[in-house]
Image: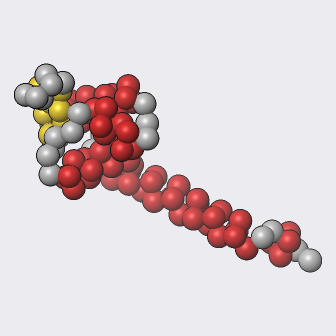
Amino acid sequence: MTPDERTPLYFRLFNEIGIINQLTTTLLNNRLPAGLLAPHFTVLNHLVRVKDGRTPLEMAKAFQIPKTTMTHQIRVLERHGFVVQAPNPMTDAPNAFG
């Protein structure tokens, strides 16, 4: 019996999914403008999909990441001219607009 035959099928499936994810993420990172990575793209994609601004905290919760990480991603996108942060007229908290 070969090692592949002893490895459960579900583990081999998830291993292949992980490999595909790694390869596609690398491909995406290589195609994005300099200084942008796949996580920045996912933030832009989220903003396009929800059609309006969200606070960094709301976005961090949606992505299940720390608010500081989301704030950094938004600042990188703002520096590249992809988003603009503006005060939320309801709370004075900044919003990100795509």
Q: Horizontal and vertical percent for residue 48?
A: 19, 52
Answer whether residue 83 is visible to the viewer in this image. Answer: no
Answer whether residue 69 is visible to the viewer in this image. Answer: yes
Q: Who's the residue at 18% across and 36% down the image?
A: 96
Q: Horizontal and vertical percent for residue 21?
A: 51, 59
Task: Residue lying at the far right in this picture: please name it.
Answer: 1
In the image, taking residue 81 as reference, residue 69 lies left or right, namely: right
- With respect to residue 95, does 25 lie above or below? below
Q: Who's the residue at 21% across and 47% down the image?
A: 47
Looking at the rendering, which quadrant does residue 25 occupy? Answer: bottom left
In the image, taking residue 65 as reference, residue 6 lies left or right, namely: right
Q: Horizontal and vertical percent for residue 22?
A: 53, 55
Q: Which colour scheme is used?
A: secondary structure
Comparing 58 with 12, the one in front is: 58
Q: Horizontal and vertical percent for residue 69?
A: 39, 30
Q: Who's the residue at 37% across and 39% down the image?
A: 61
Looking at the rendering, which quadrant does residue 28 occupy? Answer: bottom left
